Image (cartoon, grey):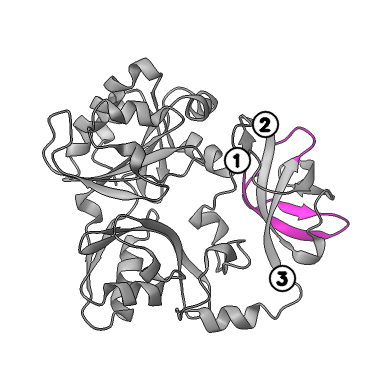
Amino acid sequence: MKTALYELHKELGATFTNFMGYEMPLKYTSVQEEHLNVRHRVGIFDVGHMGNIFVRGKDAMKFISKITVENAEKITEGKGQYTLLLNYDGDILDDEVFLHLKNEYLFIPNSGMHKKIAEWMKENAEGDVEIEDVSSDYSILAVQGPLCLDVLREIISFDIASLPLFGCYEIKNEMKIDFEGRCIISRTGYTGERGYELYIHPAEEAVQLFKKILEAGKKYGIMPVGLGARDTLRLEKGFMLACNEFEGGRNPIEAGLEWCIDWEHEFIGKDALIEFKKKEDYEKITFLECIEAGIPRKGDIVAKNEEIGIVTSGNFSPCLKKGIALAYIKTSHRNIGDEVYIEGRRKIKARIVKGPFVKKGEC
């Protein structure tokens, strides 16, 4: 599959990779250059491989509270939220952002998940709830980095700076450029830097918008950025990648995401999580920083005198200039400062550290 911007990526000289069935840009120049440009200046991403599902109806709020770990009553119009959808065993089906727009909610499933999530929603819908999967009709652009606000002000007259974190707004007649279609903006992203995401209909309108943003961003040093840097950017901040950190069935407690659960409401999977919390020892997501040369990879074994865990995500950190990894390790072995070995193609000495790997302003 290809996003609406595929031909433009070819024109821009992208190197492609297959991700969840989509032919996506891996890089345009180098992963390290694109990564550091987002940390210090600004980059633009095509994230049209993500899904788009609208939820509407007078019972939509109640429904969303049931199928996510968030109490949707607290997310008023113009706001959004990062949340989790669980199965009845308490395992994570997907982590998603949803936006509360006027008379509707927009969910953004991970790549390759929109059909599964739409079906799950329909299976659990009650009352007046409408679920519409529009993933093939929308494109998503992400503009990320310290100078993203300056770039977007060149093409949008709406006061973007007024949006709080996870705030959202539908742009009507506030484009400074020729634009025909629908555009929703949210202050969200996957890099750990200030950023905004644009949800565009019809999907093809994103081609010209991408070009206009690149043109407007030249004086700010904007670069198009591929999935390679998107992965290293999110990993430095300890953000989960669904097809890695949730693979095989992981719950929010194991994944270190209990902080996003509102326990004061009923939701699918809650009873199972309450039972799980009674366990004294279980695997939990852990941050590993290499203290000798080497790059950890997904599937590598973590060991002390014996095997104690497995790497779910590993890469080279362009900011730290060393290998970093996320791994599931038994809580009885998760002592900050302890040294371990990551065993894959080679044996790499690493240390358990407190996340994130790169804190704000450290790069």
With 137 as the anchor, is 299 left or right in this view?
Answer: right
Q: Are marks 1 and 2 in contact (CB under 8 Å)?
A: yes
Residue type at numbered disc 2: Leu
Residue 305 is drawn in which quadrant?
bottom right
Closer to the chain start, of discs 3 and 2, is: 3
Q: Identify the residue at image location x=34%, y=17%.
A: 218
- Image mark count: 3
Q: Which residue is mark 2?
A: 320
Magenta residue check for 127 = no
Closer to the chain start, of discs 1 and 3, is: 1
Instruction: State whether residue 329 is above or below residue 49.
Output: below
Residue type at numbered disc 1: Glu
- Residue 304 locus on image (x, y percent): 85, 54
Local crowd size for mark 2, using a 10 Å CA cut-off: few (<14), some (14–19), many (≥20):
some
Please say whether residue 357 is visible from this viewpoint: yes
With 146 as the anchor, is 293 left or right in this view?
Answer: right
Q: Are marks 1 and 3 in contact (CB under 8 Å)?
A: no
Residue with the most extreme right position? 305
Mark on residue 322? none
Q: Which residue is mark 3?
A: 282
Local crowd size for mark 1, using a 10 Å CA cut-off: few (<14), some (14–19), many (≥20):
many
Q: Which residue is mark 1?
A: 236
Report how far apart the C-alphas of labels 1 and 2 lie in the structure.
Answer: 9 Å
Please identify the quadrant where the C terminus is shown.
top right
Q: Identify the residue at image location x=33%, y=26%.
A: 151
Q: What segment is highlighted magenta in the picture? A: 290-314
Instruction: State whether residue 145 is above or below residue 247.
Output: above
Q: Identify the residue at image location x=17%, y=36%.
A: 174
Instruction: State whether residue 20 is above or below residue 94.
Output: above
Residue 81 is drawn in which quadrant?
bottom left
From the viewer's side, name the closer residue of 300 and 345.
300
Residue type at numbered disc 3: Tyr
